[in-house]
DNA sequence: CTGAAAGCGCTAACAA
DNA sequence: TTGTTAGCGCTTTCAG
């Protein structure tokens, strides 16, 4: 070194340490000249903190998640934390888990929709703070976890009420993965609202958050294998569990079946991905409050980290943050009286 | 511990170490029971390898990059390497750099389109292998870097030739960031092909890879502030530097200007993002060979890591891999004789 | 094939 | 405010 002791150098790089300005300046100057930088890993070894959070994602093709990842990464980076990325493509979650623990991340953000509960158990056991993103704590084990989500049920209810108000009575639900908690909440919101209005769920199909499957479900609703059904026998509005399926539905309706959206069929989605506002779709949807969600994730994570630093009781009950989103009223829903709208209660066989 | 010495345990977790099968089995069993796992950071401290690669991205909203990130992450993860994610949102590249070096990543993949050359210098200095993704080594310093890219110039040439063959003569180029090497190559491919065919570049505008800007450029080409220009005074084909701008152009043409694509104007893009094949756009574009690109990135990275492990000369000349993509012929380009096609050479004032 | 000992680069407690 | 000392958990010679 150039002048002082090892610990003096250490103190220069530790924010709240007591060190003389002069010494500090000198050390920093020499450090710059030597291109010296403290070794994070040696520091980790002794402090036990890595300043790395593991972010587990599936469906990076889901349009909504890239934005999430970008914002979260920027936010964490600005706090001096790093993001170790894991893509959970369904398979080999055990390996993933092992890596997550190997790298001793300070915290985990789980945005994968489906996940072995073994993972949950292991994290709990290792005392790693976990925040679930848009995934409710379903297993008993998950309850120790914090979670952040949009009030998806309320969002879907709002969308469904809109459709009813606009005179729709043959409303279909295009479902995502049946086992995903996100999908369950969305479906519930739709069903409950219909029930309250005394309307049946006119049709139900599983698109598994996949464009191709979604399109073929819609096809099945409108086409009997040989030709288009009578419109009165088809849904007059489609509620899709996410924007991607909604857009696939619109494409199918317009470009394969030759129907007009919203004149003949209204379509709504969920998420408000960037593409939803593109003129080609102009999709009415429900926006997740991404910035607030990110804030909440970061806040929960920081709180747990601070608690751990202060050696506080780590096993506080999991806190669940539910945020309201907002309706994005666009052109994929018809105005009050569509030409297909019958007075009230048009039922399936009517 | 339970039975043996520290070094014996270490050997159990080191692939090529000499250890008796019996000892090994016993240790592993006890380790499993105790939930023991070797501390990666302590290992890093001594081996100098972190098995972490830093991936630097900008524009995660670019539709093409999420796929890239997902595939790369999965690929690296399957090799037991981790991805530390950095989002370079233009600003604060210096901090980012510092973190990259702090975390002593084994390698860096740079997919940000614009980047301070200071970063390049620092990496070189620190001896960290760098692979540039879709970014040519422009600065002198970059030449030590390896790079992987699509032959963008050839791709654009192919698209442009297609337009010419289909009878277009008033071809406009909708540019991305002028300083991005990606954009420069794409523009060059278009211009060179036009020149070879004896056609002028009919119009040129800068959309900066942004939907709004792209749309307003297109608007300017077709609208003089009060009303639509004569079509003969407007481009009959638009070559956009990426799919996103191409789609924005289509939306503007169809939904704001009331023009028909491809009947009145043809549009082509570049990248073949998932949305390009959606029926609403059905965009003719040029697909980047993503899987091969990922392979090449991984191969270059591994080669450098192995070389470093073997203490070989680290400063090999940077290798540049250029891969051919493939034309995706879809419906956004008109067939041979559009109704707007004049015999040959329709010039601006014609 | 195994154990003992040294040390990777740092921080934390203590003493000066 | 500073230096000294110990040790974080591992890998790696070097002996046995």
Image (tube, coloured by chain):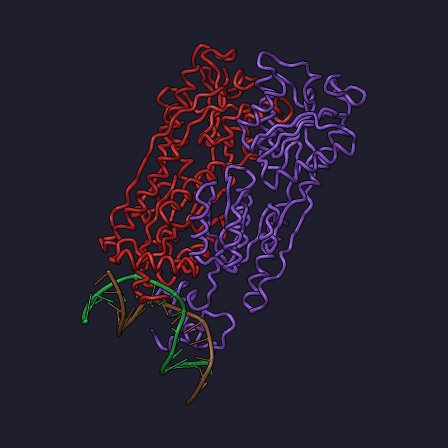
Chain colours: A red, B purple, C green, D brown
Q: Nearer the viewer, residue A266 or B325?
A: B325
Q: Where is residue B239 shown, x and y percent of the image?
A: 66, 30
Q: Quadrant of residue A195?
A: top left
Instruction: Determine the residue positioned at 46% across, 31% down.
Output: A241
Q: Nearer the viewer, residue B94 or B269?
A: B94
Instruction: Determine the residue positioned at 78% across, 31% down.
Output: B197
How many numbered discs sit on the rendered protein?
A: 0
Q: Is residue B21 visible?
A: yes
Q: Where is residue A235 shown, x and y percent of the image?
A: 51, 21
Q: Residue furthest right?
A: B343
Q: Where is residue A177 shown, x and y percent of the image?
A: 47, 38
Instruction: Determine the residue positioned at 65% across, 19% down.
Output: B260
Q: Quadrant of residue B34?
A: bottom left
Instruction: Determine the residue positioned at 67% across, 47% down.
Output: B323
Residue A46 drawn above or below residue B220 = below
Q: Is residue B77 visible?
A: no
Q: Is B194 positioned to the left or the right of B73 in the image?
A: right
Q: Is A61 positioned to the left or the right of B258 in the image?
A: left
Residue A66 drawn above or below residue A193 = below
Residue B17 drawn above or below residue B114 = below
Quarter containing the N terminus of chain A: bottom left
Q: Where is residue B245 shown, x and y percent of the image?
A: 58, 30
Q: Nearer the viewer, residue C8 or B8?
A: C8
């Amino acid at each position: 070194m150039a002048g002082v002791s090892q610990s003096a150098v250490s103190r220069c790089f530790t924010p709240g340490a007591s060190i003389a300005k002069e010494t500090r300046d000198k050390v920093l100057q020499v450090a710059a000249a030597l291109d010296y930088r403290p070794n994070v890993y040696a520091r980790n070894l002794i402090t036990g903190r890595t300043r790395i959070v593991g972010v587990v994602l599936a469906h990076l093709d889901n349009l909504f998640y890239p934005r999430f990842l970008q914002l979260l990464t920027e936010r964490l980076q600005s706090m001096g934390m790093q993001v170790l990325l894991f893509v959970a493509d369904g398979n080999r979650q055990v390996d993933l888990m092992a890596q997550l623990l190997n790298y001793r991340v300070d915290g985990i953000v789980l945005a994968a929709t489906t996940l072995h509960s073994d993972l949950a158990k292991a994290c709990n056991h290792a005392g790693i703070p976990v925040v679930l993103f848009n995934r409710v704590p379903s297993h008993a084990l998950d309850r120790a976890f914090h979670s952040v989500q949009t009030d998806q049920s309320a969002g879907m209810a709002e969308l469904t009420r809109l459709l009813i108000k606009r005179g729709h009575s043959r409303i279909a639900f295009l479902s995502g993965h049946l086992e995903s908690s996100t999908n369950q909440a969305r479906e519930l919101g739709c069903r409950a609202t219909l029930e309250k209005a005394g309307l049946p769920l006119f049709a139900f199909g599983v698109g598994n958050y996949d464009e191709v499957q979604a399109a073929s479900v819609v096809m099945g609703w409108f086409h009997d294998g040989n030709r288009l059904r009578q419109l009165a026998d088809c849904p007059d509005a489609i509620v899709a569990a996410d924007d991607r399926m909604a857009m696939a539905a619109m494409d199918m309706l317009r470009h394969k079946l030759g129907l007009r959206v919203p004149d003949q069929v209204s379509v709504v989605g969920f998420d408000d991905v960037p593409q939803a506002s593109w003129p080609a779709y102009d999709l009415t949807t429900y926006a997740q409050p991404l910035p607030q969600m990110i804030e909440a994730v970061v806040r929960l994570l920081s709180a747990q980290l601070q608690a751990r630093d202060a050696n506080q009781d780590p096993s506080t009950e999991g806190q669940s943050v539910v945020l309201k989103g907002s309706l994005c009223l666009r052109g994929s829903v018809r105005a009050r009286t569509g030409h297909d709208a019958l007075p009230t209660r048009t039922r399936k066989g009517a």
